[in-house]
Image (cartoon, rainbow, N blue to C red):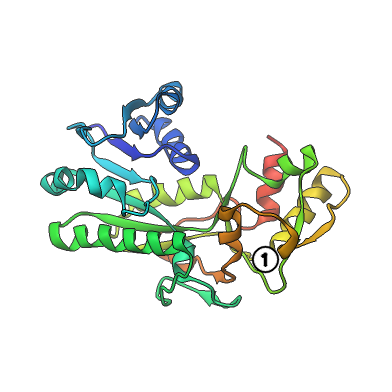
Amino acid sequence: MMNHLLCFGFGFSARALAARLQGKGWDISATSRDAEGLRRISASGAAGFLFEPGFIIPSSVTHILVSAPPDADGDPVLRWFEPQLRQRAADFKWVGYLSTTGVYGDKGGDWVDENSALEPHTERGKRRLSAELAWLKLQLDHGFRVHIFRLAGIYGSGRNPFIALRNGTAKRIIKPGQIFSRIHVEDIAGTLEASIKHPHPARAYNVCDDEPCPPQDVVAYAAELLGVPLPPETAFEDAQLSPMAKSFYADSKRVSNARLKTELGYELLYPNYRSGLAALLKQ
């Protein structure tokens, strides 16, 4: 039987997994809310479907990736398609839900793992935790094979500090004590593929590299690689960040990735930002 992945949402991480699996003979389908998104899906070689209540999940789908974010009313995939999902639970070998390390909340720079308390205080983190719990309830009630992936800050081709450095908009934003974890998008795809090969339903995984650090360190190293002057330091209070960017700075913690290594046997391609940025510069 042919493996067929359906992506609810076709953002940065979903596209990376789709490309990885297409190269291994998988069928890929994905949803989008608009015509432009459907064109992007088609251009990637996948089958595109409009994300709307009348959508019928193709009968050939064997695996599902959920990357569509929750909104104020909850998870839109469950809101519209839960009856279909319940009826066909046995058809799906693997379901992955992309969440965020924001579900842990602010830990003052301390370490967290998958057994740490889930105490989000941002709206984004609270919505993601509610969505996680809703998907896990589907697992408990209907035998759905759900896996939760808590993603750190994502970077990769087309999304990295080189872009801002080259166009002159880069900042070294200073917030004392701020620590982030991050992950290269190709390592997200690799982790998801490892989970598909070694499924552990109802399990959550932190997806991050080995080296949490202050965000200004990453910008400084990228500038060094490019051979350009360091951007000036900007205090967090003066940075004029978007609401989304501010939400990232609301939490400070170091995230452990031990479980994805030991349980999934995944070896990171880019175990720290230095190796990841150096590889991106060569592309």
Left or right for 137, reference 208 = left
Q: Position of residue 229 (x, y in %)?
A: 88, 49
Residue at 61% of width from left, 52% of height from top?
242
Residue at 43% of width from left, 22% of height from top?
39
Camera-nearest residue between 136 and 173:
173
Q: Position of residue 195 (x, y in %)?
A: 36, 53
Which quadrant of the view contains residue 183? Answer: bottom right
Q: Outermost residue toward the left?
A: 87
**Three-letter residue code for mark 1:** Cys
Residue at 43% of width from left, 74% of height from top?
119
Compared to residue 283, the image places residue 118 above or below, namely below
Which quadrant of the view contains residue 88? Answer: top left
Compared to residue 86, the image places residue 109 above or below, namely below
Residue at 48% of width from left, 39% of height from top?
16
Camera-nearest residue between 119 and 152:
119
Figure label count: 1
Left or right for 145, reference 214 = left
Image quarter hosting the C terminus: top right
Left or right for 203, reference 143 = right
Within 10 Å of the Cα at label 1, are there few (<14), some (14-19), or many (20+) other Cα atoms?
many
Residue 182 shows in the view: yes
Which element type, helix, strand or loop, lies under badge 1?
loop
Q: Position of residue 112 (x, y in %)?
A: 50, 74
Image quarter hosting the N terminus: top left
Left or right for 84, reference 35 = left
Residue 93 shows in the view: no
> Label 1, on which residue?
213
Q: Position of residue 278 (x, y in %)?
A: 72, 46
Camera-nearest residue between 194 and 228:
228
